[in-house]
Amino acid sequence: MAPSRNDMILKPHFHKNWQRRVATWFNQPAHKIRRKTSAPKKGDSSAAKLKLATQLTGPVMPIRNIYKKEKARVITEEEKNFKAFASL
């Protein structure tokens, strides 16, 4: 139940066998242990799966951003005297 007005708890109006319908998470630590034990371990994969697990190559993958460096140049007087706010 959500709190209302002065944070008073409203009457929940539970019906028959409400204990079965209320969702609880009291067994959270046990669920965590179960998830951890069932997770795949290091070295579990077979040689066939390892052979298939390769990085794609070609026009799609891998994506690499290659930038060309511009050579350094001397700043001109016109660039020095440029006023950005005056041009607006």
Image: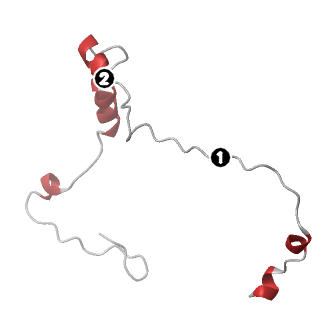
Q: Report the residue at 43% width, 81% height from top.
A: 6
Q: What amino acid does circle 2 point to?
A: Pro
x and y, in percent, of residue 19 in the image:
16, 54
Q: Which quarter of the picture shows residue 59? A: top left
The local crowd at label 2, few if under 14, some if 14 to 19, many if 20 or more residues have their Cα within 10 Å, is few
Q: Which quarter of the picture shows residue 15? A: bottom left
Q: Is residue 14 above or below residue 30?
A: below
**Is 16 situated left or right of 79 in this image?**
left
Q: What amino acid does circle 1 point to?
A: Lys
Comes first in the chain, label 1 or label 2: 2
**Is 11 situated left or right of 19 in this image?**
right
Q: Which residue is mark 1?
A: 68
Q: Report the residue at 34% width, 19% height from top.
A: 41
Q: Which quarter of the picture shows residue 62? A: top left
x and y, in percent, of residue 11 in the image:
25, 74
Residue 22: assigned label: none
Q: Which residue is mark 2?
A: 40
The local crowd at label 1, few if under 14, some if 14 to 19, many if 20 or more residues have their Cα within 10 Å, is few
